[in-house]
Image: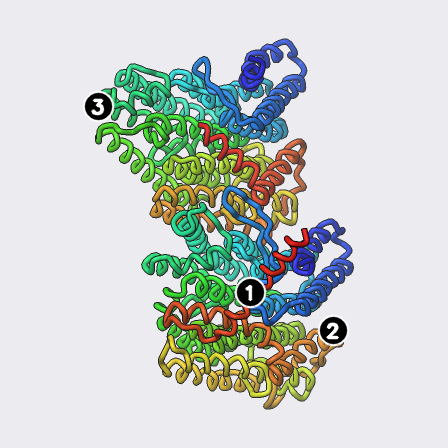
């Protein structure tokens, strides 16, 4: 029992802080520091307690929640993303003259939502997690309410998000109607023994797929993403487009693993129709993945606003991650975990640089504003080029190895055509990532930018760089851990 | 083995140290970089002496597991073919760095950091014995080269560097796909031990892949290498990149980077897919021949000296590819010696062009004339480099071209004289465009007043050029010093290829030698066991 309590610790810590940070907030009206440090403490504690759990590869299932195993990996990833965002935020909010403590409470709540998705063992708990996360994000996106862009982003996100949630919950209801169960393991059991209503199941799966595809901004359900990502405060975008997206992918993994693509050792002597469903679901997801990669990258190609370009590129990266879902194997899931880690570092790093460079009135976000950055702010230019090279997928950076592993898993699953498309879309992406470096290093500006003040954001950038290099040069630890935890998944 | 590790890692260590030096200490950074590079060259000499040319296998092999779940390791080693090219790399790098003293004037700290990283990656490409590691080094080249052309290049640098980057990455991403697919197929279907990127394992297993898969894999690798070589019609990035790069950048680009392509063809395409290589050898050889003629013709009409030298590379590399796909021992050896030759002679031509550019800031042939009277020493060096490039007997270029042509002529796989006959006319064209250019620049009347005050070579420029001249003459007069090193490695490869095609081994003594090695080892092992 003692160890099991230890395994519940990350979720317990997150819940405790999510509930009590708003209370600290009210109590310490004048002092922003308290809330900031309480939030930081929360994230650090979650990381420490989850990484500690990874050593034993132990996992168990109780109260409809999973503990240990893969959840520890994703818990630590989410809180890493949260720490990086938190460190970058202080500076940004000060610049916007909108430094209110509620921000930190919302960050805690969003993190708790993600962790609940991650630990979820049945449809309803997953739904609660998704809602908790999404609602926090709706508010965060409109956090700077004196700005029209921010409000627009928030409203757009809320309206469309609510609509997508409708799809999701309706799909869940259908699946419940079809099988009479909400626990994943029970549903999987029913599917394996062909003890379910085929029509409801197919509709339910389709609806859930739409809902999740919206949350993880997969083409053709991605239309909200660029507007919301551009309008929201930059640091919120960085958190939303990394941790938020990965949380949606965790939900994707859980749903596909149990419902769509039960490829494990379970005796699968079901009806042909079930196999049919599985096959076509896999194919549909593969097509979504291909479309996401290609459309995301092509649209990013023509953007002149850096933030918007990164928003589209984050859509494209969702496509790469989806390849791991398509292959639906241990390697695929391990690849997703690895890519998620690399993606968190490179995307948050890039957005942090953008947030430092942008002005209070949302100007200075165009490509030509970055001209000559290597002379005025060499550190920022250096960091940004590392993030860009990693996003392109050049070795020896983390992004490369993540892609390598995802490609491998897709090829192993027999999806060579998908990998070829992924390669082609990476080629397209080279142009705009490299274009930013051209502006920073090879061009000059008439009025050079002033030396920018970094504050705590520099810590966030340095951690990101170290993270990218570590993942690129020593991928062994993470990938082995991921493979081990997913073997017992 | 320590020597190999040092050869690889000294430039990296140097580069990291440069990062910590204050950027105002430009002189210190320059000499520190040069020192690192010379030290690396000296260390690599130790490799040369420790190398056993009789042994055709991979020597100095180091196998350190890196990513255990993918059986990817830090595996390095070298055989005769890689040794020569590694020596070329360590030899040309200090020369390029010394040449940078005159041609690089701003952002020096970044520059010397980049060039050391470049040297590290280049060495890595030639000694990696693991496909994954090879790919990492291969891509790592891109980043420093991208910056070197983009920051320190000429007028049109952004266009040139982006073109270079995109061309290269198009090829290499498909190679990545090939690497993954190959490792997957070999690991799971042939060896059944799971995914592996171990070069030595794949080398033995890959030839048994069915031909229809081999063909796809062959092209996945080959396109990437052809772009790098560059083989006609993938060559269009090269003139731009060469012309816009700063002088040392061009030297490294022509001297070493292009060799990565031809080296990759031998190391991967011939070793992994002998059947597919034979299948496509005639197409590729024709492309090589077309490249020889086309490069020469286009070079003849250039008005910019540097661009002319760049196009001559297309022509020279055609000989290398022809030698490789003749798949005979003499052709392969000729290809390797021609790679070294091209590095020396074209590298020297670029250096010489850079020297006159520093003085006059133009490379337009029409701006010059009668230079020989004002700069006699310069003209002499230029003549040596030019004759070496033309292929005058007694200098190095002749040896390489002769051997590749003989290889193509006697090749049982190409089995057609036409390649040699057409390619040989390329030698004549080379004489045409180079001699004509030489005549226009160095002879005639010195009409342009700007040229009247030109100064002849400085001591530093002498120091740069003399070592290259020594090797140009050495290879020309006594090539055996160099061909001996690569002889057995190439023969082993030819044995493997002819085994597949004709079921015979033209050099049976090698197999005996390898068997002896094995028995030696087993005897030693037994003795060791008995001792215990």
User: Where on the picture, by quarter, is residue B485?
Assistant: bottom right
The residue at the far front in this view is: B530
In which quadrant will I find the N terminus of chain B? Answer: bottom right
The answer to which of B379 and B496 lies nearer the viewer is B496
Same subunit: marks 2 and 3: no
Q: Which residue is mark 1?
A: B57
Mark 2 vs mark 1: in front: 1
Tell me the crowding category of disc 3: few under 14, some 14 to 19, or many 20 or more residues within 10 angstroms, Cα based. Answer: few
Tell me if label 2 and label 3 are in contact, CB under 8 Å: no
Q: Residue A176 location in percent, x, y?
A: 30, 16
Report the Cα–Cα distance between label 2 and label 3. Answer: 83 Å
Q: Colour scheme in the image?
A: rainbow
Q: Which mark is residue B460?
A: 2
A429 in relation to A199, above or below? below
The residue at the far bottom in this view is: B444
Q: Secondary structure at mark 2?
A: helix
Tell me the crowding category of disc 2: few under 14, some 14 to 19, or many 20 or more residues within 10 angstroms, Cα based. Answer: few
Asked if one can make out residue A308 in the rendered structure from this viewpoint, the answer is yes
Report the Cα–Cα distance between label 1 and label 3. Answer: 64 Å
Asked if one can make out residue A354 in the rendered structure from this viewpoint, the answer is no
The answer to which of B90 and B208 lies nearer the viewer is B208
The subunit letter for the residue under badge 3 reads A
Residue at screen point 54% across, 53% down? B133
Mark 1 vs mark 3: in front: 1
Q: Which residue is mark 3?
A: A199
Horizontally, is A462 left or right of B30 in the view? left
Residue at screen point 66% across, 31% down? A456
Tell me the crowding category of disc 1: few under 14, some 14 to 19, or many 20 or more residues within 10 angstroms, Cα based. Answer: some
Q: Secondary structure at mark 3?
A: helix
Tell me if label 2 and label 1 are in contact, CB under 8 Å: no
């Amino acid at each position: 029992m003692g160890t099991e309590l230890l395994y519940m610790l990350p979720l317990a810590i997150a819940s405790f802080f999510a509930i009590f940070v708003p209370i600290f907030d009210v109590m310490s009206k004048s002092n922003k520091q308290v809330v900031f440090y309480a939030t930081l403490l929360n994230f650090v504690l979650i990381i420490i307690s989850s990484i500690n759990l990874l050593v034993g590869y132990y996992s168990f299932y109780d109260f409809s929640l999973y503990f240990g195993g893969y959840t520890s990996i994703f818990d630590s990833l989410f809180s890493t993303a949260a720490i990086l965002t938190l460190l970058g935020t202080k500076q940004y909010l000060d610049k916007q003259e909108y430094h209110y403590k509620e921000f930190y409470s919302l960050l805690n709540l969003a993190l708790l939502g993600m962790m609940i998705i991650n630990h979820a063992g049945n449809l309803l708990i997953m739904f609660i997690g998704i809602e908790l996360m999404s609602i926090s994000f709706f508010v965060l996106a409109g956090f700077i309410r004196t700005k029209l862009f921010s409000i627009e982003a928030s409203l757009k996100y809320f309206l469309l998000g609510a609509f997508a949630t409708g799809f999701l919950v309706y799909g869940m209801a259908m699946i419940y109607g079809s099988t009479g169960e909400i626990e994943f393991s029970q549903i999987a059991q029913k599917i394996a023994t062909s003890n379910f209503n085929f029509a409801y199941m197919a509709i339910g799966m389709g609806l859930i797929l739409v809902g999740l595809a919206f949350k993880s901004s997969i083409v053709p359900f991605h239309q909200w993403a660029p507007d919301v990502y551009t309008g929201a405060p930059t640091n919120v975008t960085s958190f939303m487009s990394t941790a938020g997206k990965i949380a949606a992918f965790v939900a994707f993994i859980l749903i596909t693993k149990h419902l769509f693509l039960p490829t494990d050792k379970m005796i699968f002597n079901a009806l042909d129709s079930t196999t049919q469903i599985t096959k076509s679901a896999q194919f549909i997801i593969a097509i979504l993945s291909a479309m996401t990669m290609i459309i995301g990258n092509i649209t990013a190609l023509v953007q002149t606003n850096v933030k918007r370009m990164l928003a589209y590129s984050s859509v494209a990266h969702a496509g790469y991650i989806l390849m791991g879902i398509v292959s639906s194997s241990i390697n695929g899931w391990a690849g997703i975990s690895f890519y998620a880690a690399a993606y968190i570092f490179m995307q948050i790093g890039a957005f942090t640089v953008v947030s430092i460079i942008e002005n209070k009135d949302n100007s200075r976000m165009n490509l030509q504003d970055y001209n000559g950055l290597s002379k005025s702010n060499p550190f920022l230019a250096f960091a940004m080029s590392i993030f860009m090279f990693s996003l392109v997928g050049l070795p020896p950076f983390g992004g490369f190895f993540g892609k390598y592993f995802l490609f491998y898993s897709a090829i192993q699953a027999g999806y060579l055509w998908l990998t070829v498309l992924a390669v082609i879309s990476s080629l397209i992406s080279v142009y705009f990532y490299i274009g930013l470096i051209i502006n920073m290093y090879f061009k000059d500006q008439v009025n050079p930018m002033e030396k920018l003040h970094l504050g705590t954001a520099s810590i966030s950038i340095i951690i990101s760089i170290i993270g990218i290099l570590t993942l690129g040069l020593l991928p062994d630890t993470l990938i082995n851990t991921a493979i081990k935890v997913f073997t017992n998944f | 083995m320590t020597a190999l590790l040092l050869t690889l890692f000294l430039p990296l260590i140097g580069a990291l140290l440069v990062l910590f030096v204050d950027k105002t200490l430009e002189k210190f950074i320059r000499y520190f970089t040069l020192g690192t590079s010379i030290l690396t060259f000296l260390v690599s000499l130790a490799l040369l002496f420790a190398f056993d040319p009789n042994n055709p296998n991979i020597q100095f092999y180091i196998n350190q597991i890196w990513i255990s779940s993918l059986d990817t390791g830090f595996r390095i080693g070298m055989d005769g073919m890689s040794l020569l090219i590694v020596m070329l790399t360590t030899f040309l790098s200090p020369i390029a760095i010394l040449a940078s003293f005159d041609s690089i004037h701003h952002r020096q700290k970044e520059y010397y950091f980049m060039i050391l990283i470049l040297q590290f990656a280049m060495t890595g490409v030639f000694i990696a014995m693991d496909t994954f590691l090879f790919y990492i080094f291969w891509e790592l080249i891109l980043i420093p080269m991208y910056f070197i052309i983009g920051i320190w290049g000429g007028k049109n640098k952004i266009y040139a560097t982006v073109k270079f980057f995109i061309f290269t990455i198009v090829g290499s991403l498909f190679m990545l796909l090939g690497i993954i697919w190959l490792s997957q197929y070999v690991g799971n279907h042939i060896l059944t031990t799971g995914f592996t990127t171990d070069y030595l394992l794949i080398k033995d297993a890959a030839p048994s892949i069915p031909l229809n898969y081999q063909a796809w894999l062959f092209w996945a690798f080959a396109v990437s290498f052809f772009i790098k070589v560059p083989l006609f019609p993938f060559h269009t990035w090269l003139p731009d990149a060469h012309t816009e790069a700063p002088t040392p950048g061009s030297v490294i680009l022509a001297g070493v980077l292009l060799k990565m392509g031809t080296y990759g063809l031998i190391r991967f395409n011939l070793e992994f897919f002998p059947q597919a290589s034979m299948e496509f050898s005639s197409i590729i050889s024709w492309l090589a021949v077309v490249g020889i003629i086309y490069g020469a013709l286009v070079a003849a009409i250039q008005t910019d000296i540097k661009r002319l030298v760049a196009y001559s590379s297309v022509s020279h590399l055609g000989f290398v590819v022809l030698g490789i796909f003749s798949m005979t021992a003499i052709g392969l050896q000729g290809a390797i010696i021609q790679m070294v030759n091209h590095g020396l002679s074209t590298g020297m031509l670029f250096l010489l062009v850079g020297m006159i550019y520093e003085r006059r800031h133009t490379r337009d042939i029409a701006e010059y004339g009668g230079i020989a009277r004002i700069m006699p020493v310069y003209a002499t060096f230029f003549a040596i480099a030019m004759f070496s490039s033309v292929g005058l007997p007694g200098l190095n270029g002749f040896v390489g071209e002769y051997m590749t042509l003989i290889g193509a002529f006697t090749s049982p796989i190409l089995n057609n004289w036409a390649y040699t006959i057409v390619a040989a006319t390329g030698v004549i064209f080379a004489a045409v465009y180079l001699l004509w250019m030489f005549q226009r620049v160095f002879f005639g009347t010195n009409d342009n007043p700007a040229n009247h005050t030109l100064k002849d070579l400085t001591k530093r420029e002498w120091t740069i050029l003399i070592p290259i001249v020594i090797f140009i003459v050495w290879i020309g007069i006594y090539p055996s010093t160099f061909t001996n090193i690569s002889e057995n490695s190439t023969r082993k490869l030819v044995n493997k290829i002819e085994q597949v095609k004709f079921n015979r081994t033209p050099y049976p003594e090698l197999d005996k030698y390898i068997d002896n090695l094995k028995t030696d080892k087993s005897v030693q092992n037994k003795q060791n066991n008995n001792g215990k």
